[in-house]
Image (tube, helix red, strand yellow):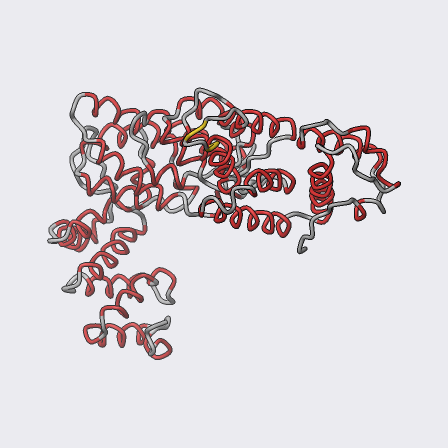
Amino acid sequence: MVFSYSKELLGYSKGHWQKLMAVWDGLNIETQIEILDQVATLEGDDRSKHDLCKQALKSSNTYVRYAAAKWIISHINNSSFVAKYEVEAEKLVKSIDTNKASERDELLNLIRNDKSDLVRYSEYEVEDTFYLGSRLQMGFWKLPQKARLALMRSRKDRSHASSDVLLHLVTEAQELIENNSLAWEEVDEVLTEFAYNAFGDESWHTKDYYSIYDLDYRLRDLWEIIPLLKDYYAEEYLKRIPYVENAWVNFEKIMRQCSDRQLEIILNREDVKLVEIRKELFFDEKIKDGVKWAAIHFHFYPTYEEFQQILDRYNQKIKISNRDYTKIQLLGDIGTGCTSLSLCMYQAILTLLEDERNQDEWVAQNLEIINLHMENKIKSTNVYQREKEITDLRLFQLSSHVYDRSDYFYDDSIAFLAIRVVQGDCWKTFMAFAAVWAKYRPEEVSKKISGSRKILI
């Protein structure tokens, strides 16, 4: 804590608060802000805190007045007070204690007439304002933009996300944009403010018995907003919207309705798995390259047969200045851009790129990145998976030595693999080896495979 006199000036008794108020004007701005930001958790009665915040409203610093205003508004009459502004619906004003009416009105007028928008619209950051149902929904887009943003700042966690209300607001905004009554930039600012405040809470990723249904319904509404945005991709909203695996969200349907830019933003998130959707997008010939590369960046786990399709596709050579750019460049992009391939797949790409190491500088850089991916893969897998990955890698190394040779000498322990060679095709030879190896699994043999590659574990 910056405030170094807390033991003397911060305490429960009236004396502590009287001393604090006496020294208040002499404290620097940083200390005043720190105290006001923590005032709700400080010891002491609400009346003492109220008097301190009332004094802070006279500060020349905007944020000090803002912090004080928020506490005063949220504690008037021990409940939240809804801003007294005309909207389409009726005035939303709560009942008050008549004995405190004059003081209450004085403070509210002081806040509403403040020269700063941040202070004036602090009333809208009171939580209750977002739970007023249809009345608030009807009038939200009639409010000044800074009032809308203040409402979004009141969303602090999952319990305050009010996803159904936000879904309604975005649906309403679509019509207003089409009628030129609202600018998309205003909607984007609202969604960004909401995302920064509501999506940072860890409770989105906690599914206990009591909250599972609440979580799933909220996520469903929040994700269903995305297709409504159409050409407006709301980048910060898409980067921050919570993703919970196995939630009651039809991700496949939503992803099919997204624009290419929306897909790129969502798929470039490491926390968003969508394993099958990623593979489907990558292998779809109609999907643009930007979406394909985003799809494979994380959680792309092709089977060995699917990887064969990739190799077959890029073996269709396109010559540019007598160079096979289809195979070299695109496989290099896959190897460097995908962080989750199996070790043997990375090695297959390395093998194809190795011959070009001295031809282009970028090839050498790609090889370095792919080797780094392989090391990270080994470190991030469990013991069983690591052993399987390394065994398959050694099998691939063996296949790279024998697929185009008929004179290779096999150790007796692996001689049963000889009849599985697919002449002229390294990857198909490896798949044949891997298939028979899965049946026999000779434990002591895996370390003896000829041509095995040394790996740091």
Q: Quadrant of the N terminus?
A: bottom left
Residue drawn at the location 19% of the way across and 35% of the way down: 91
> For this rendering, which residue is in front, 432 or 419?
419
- Residue 26 image position (x, y, % from top left): 20, 76
Q: In the picture, residue 300 is in which quadrant? A: top right
Q: Residue furthest right?
A: 412
- Residue 333 image position (x, y, % from top left): 48, 38
- Residue 56 image position (x, y, % from top left): 20, 64
Viewed as shown, does residue 9 lie left or right of 268? Answer: left
Viewed as shown, does residue 43 lie left or right of 299? Answer: left
Viewed as shown, does residue 308 lie left or right of 448? Answer: left
> For this rendering, which residue is in front, 338 or 355?
355
Q: Quadrant of the C terminus?
A: bottom right
Residue drawn at the location 26% of the way across and 24% of the way down: 174
> For this rendering, which residue is in front, 236 or 109?
236
Residue drawn at the location 31% of the way across and 48% of the way down: 79
> For this rendering, which residue is in front, 442 or 146?
442
Q: In the picture, residue 343 is in which quadrant? A: top right
- Residue 284 image position (x, y, % from top left): 49, 22
Viewed as shown, does residue 293 lie left or right of 402? Answer: left
